[in-house]
Every structure is written in structure tokens, then in C-alpha cells.
Image (tube, helix red, strand yellow):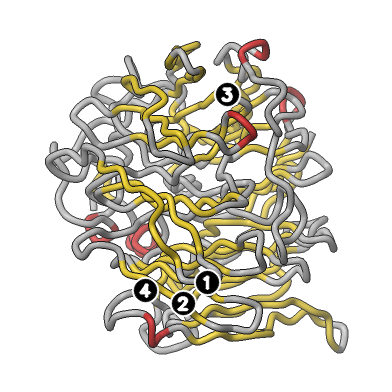
Amino acid sequence: MSVRGYRWPAIVVAVLVATGVLGGIAQAAPAAPGPATGVGPTGTSLMHGDLWSTDSTSFHGPGRTARLATSSIPGGACAATFIGRDGFPVSLCTQFIGTAPAAFAVPTVTLFDPATAAPLARLQLTKGGLLGGVYGYLDDRDRVVVADGSGSILRVAHRKSGGRWQIVVDDRIDVSHRIPKGDAITGLAPDFDGRVWFATTQGVVGTVDRDKRIRSTHLPRGERLGNGLSVRASGASILTTHALYEMRADADGVPHVIWRRAYDRGQARRPGQLTWGSGTTPTYFGPGGDGWVAIVDNAARPQLIVYDSDTGSTVCRMPAFVRSGQGTENSPMAWGNSLVIPSTYGYQYPPMAVDGPSVPGNAPFVGGSTRIDVSTQGCRRIWENGDRIATLPRLSRADGLIHALGYGPYRPGGIQQIGPIDYVATDFATGKRVRTLRVGEGPVDEPLELTGTIGRDGTLWQATVGRMLKITR
């Protein structure tokens, strides 16, 4: 695979295939939802930061005094990292080469030393769908809850035995009888009643209760899922390649649709997105913390659309970007009544990692991010910058900064996604960069749109295609 004249190393292609102004804030709105039943520490237990998928945290990040403290080579690309009560980072990774013959890009749970970032133990899972080893969360016993390719939901624990760390499957729930042949679990999330919600690529949405009773429903055929689930106290938001759904589990746990809103999915997949349709995980935000839900559609000029979470009525809509690339695969970050949306338009994925051809066939990775504030009077753009962010950023409500990895400025005619990889801290209030720290070089340290996690001590744990980075203050 080539990127504007550059040919990716085969090992990078294999990994790519497997992964994928404060006054404007409504200060009265809760910063993040309270903990759901069975979830680990707030802020470090979910891929999108919290159940509302705000991609925000209450912890300070590295920020203006950031330094690369250390790094390690985990043997794969780690798409999501969690930190439990014991302080140990544990990641959902895609290991380059598995132990079975001809096993490439194998989903693997990896435990890291919190001081040195060195891998301490690994457990390979059964290979399944593209996102089966990516979306998961940490439970209240520091176990990773993740789906494997056999159609099971696993609870994976780490423990020390005989002086050595081990990772073991502590619990297994077989839901394969609810999933059509050839389908795979895409998203997992806990709710506030002790259930685990799951969703599959082909549109099966189900729940598993404390007694391991499984209930499910099937969304309209032809609608596929390529993103995670967002959960609030009264239900869940699920986005397919055709429509946004607000769903609720009845007394018996069966998910049912409260409302459905179709959106403009465009004429084809856009370059820089994995599927034909919206690339965003829905984000709850606004009144009460979850009164609104936001997505970005896949129109020729993508629109930010904000809905009332209870009724599905449109609160506001406007073009998501002006100067930035016209499309995104990232969930909007949220703080109060404000959203920050990074552009991924033109970001290069290998052909086998995406669902169908894109229109146009390729485009430059221009980048750009924008902040939009929302009120009952409509949407209002606050700023737009040119940052070429290449990870799923994390917004800190403690320091008012957006923390990510990215590339330097876009240069027309230049080779894209090659060159210095920087840690970037951007001011939420102004959109201006306050810190740039070189931490790697592409494509060896290609950020892959992977997700970082900020711990209580202000450390950003961020993976690239080849390393796990520990960036501290």
C-alpha cells in the first residue's frame, strides 16, 4: 500500500488492517456521568473516557511541561489503554505475529509496568472482526471486558503468581447463538443496571444481565455498525451506517428503539473513514450532561447534528468544518455545551481495513479541528485550527487542554503521514497550540488514530504502531 508515493512496510499494513473559551461552557452541566454498576475507576476505564463518550477527563495531562519519560515495544499496536485501581496500565492491542501458525494481527490483552512501560504479560484472544479486540472497558475488579472472535464476552484479569505476572480469562459468556454466522461483536459497554450491552457489525444489539441472561434485537438489515456504544442512565445511543438510534432495555433486558433518525450517509465511504456512513461514536452532552446527543454525518459537506436525547428532535445542525478536511472518524469531544471535532479526512488506511471504495479514491490528510458551542438558539463555531491530529484526542477538564499526537503542518505536494510525530497540547478556549514535543518519527511511530489515556498522575499513555509512550509532566 502506498501513501502519496510512500509504500507501507508489510508489518504496518497488517496492524492497520486489524485496528482502526471557558465562558462558553455550561458550568452547571455535570462534567461526566457517575459510575455505572461494575465499571472501574472514573476516567481511565473506558475507550472514550466515560459512558457518554465525551473523550474528556477530570485529570491534568502532560501539557506545557510535557516530556517523553520512557517507552517500550509491546509487539503490537494498542488501540485502547485502561488504568485500574492498582495503577497498572492494561491495553487492548493487536499483536503483529501470534503464536498459532500464520497468525497475524492477533487481538491481545497486554499488561504494562507503570514505572518503566515495559510489557509484563500478554494473552492472545481468538481473532474475530475488525473492532472485536478494540472496544472494551475495565470493570470494578480491574478486569478487561472484551469480545473475542468466538462470539464470547470475556473478563480478563491480571495477577501475580510465583513472582511473575499472568493474564487469564476469569469469566466467559457465550453469546454466539445470538450472532449470525460471519458476524462479530463491534462494541461493548456497561449500563447503570448492571447489564453489559453489545452490538455487532451486522446490527444485532443485545444485553447480558448479572445472571448472564442474554436478550437481543436486530436492527434493519443492511445497516452495519463500525463504532462504539454510548450509554446514559436511561438508555444507549447506537449509530449505524444509516441512522442514529436511541434505545432502552425493557424490564426483561430486551433492547428496543425509542427513536430513530436517518442521516445523510453520502454516496460512498469518504477517504479517512472506515465505513460508508458516519464515522463518529455518538456523544452525549448538554443539559444534565446527557440531554443532547451529537454525531457528524457523511454528507458531501459533513454536518454536525445535535438531537434531543429524549425525543430525537433536532437541536441544531451546521457544517462540521470550514477549512479542515471534510470528514471525521473520531467521536466529538464534549465539555458542558461545547464540542470539539477533529478532522480525519484523507487519513490513509490500507484497502483491506476499510469497507468498500472511497469517493474520491484518495485525498490529502489536511487535518484541522474545530470547536462548536451549542444552545437552544443553535450552533456557533468558536474556532478552527490546522492541527493534523492522528490519535483519538483526550480533552482535560482540569487543565483546559486537548492532548494528542499529530503531524506537522500540511504541505501541498508533500508525502503525507511521513515525518516527525509530535505530542500536541491545544488550548480548548482558543484552539491555539501551547506545547509541541517530538516523540517519534513516522511511519515507525505512526499514531494510527489510536486512543490514549491520561492517568491520575497526569501521565499520558499513548500507543503508536510500534511503541507504547509514557508522556509525563
What element does badge 4 sit on? loop
Label 2 sits on residue? 215
Which residue is more in the foreground, 303 or 207? 207
The image's mark for residue 253 is 1
Residue 201, percent across and down? Answer: 33, 65
Q: Are marks 3 and 4 in contact (CB under 8 Å)?
A: no
Residue 166, percent across and down? Answer: 74, 82
Label 3 sits on residue? 337
Question: Which residue is rendered at x = 19% and y = 62% of the image?
Answer: 222
Q: Are marks 2 and 1 in contact (CB under 8 Å)?
A: yes
Separation of residues labelled 3 and 4 (CA atoms): 35 Å
What element does badge 1 sit on? loop
The image's mark for residue 443 is none
The image's mark for residue 184 is 4
- The residue mark sitting in front, 4 or 1, is 1
Q: How many marks?
A: 4
First in sequence: mark 3 vs mark 4: 4
Task: Please say if 63 is above or below 15.
Answer: above
Instruction: Identify residue type, mark 1.
Output: Gly
Separation of residues labelled 2 and 1 (CA atoms): 6 Å
Instruction: Identify residue type, mark 3.
Output: Asn
Which residue is more in the foreground, 272 or 189? 189
Determine whether, in the image, residue 70 is placed left or right of residue 268: right
Q: Quadrant of residue 311?
A: top left
What element does badge 3 sit on? loop
Residue 243, percent across and down? Answer: 29, 47
Estimate how packed mark 4 is, as few (under 14), some (14 to 19) or many (20 or more) residues with alpha carbons within 10 Å: many
Determine if residue 29 is in view. yes
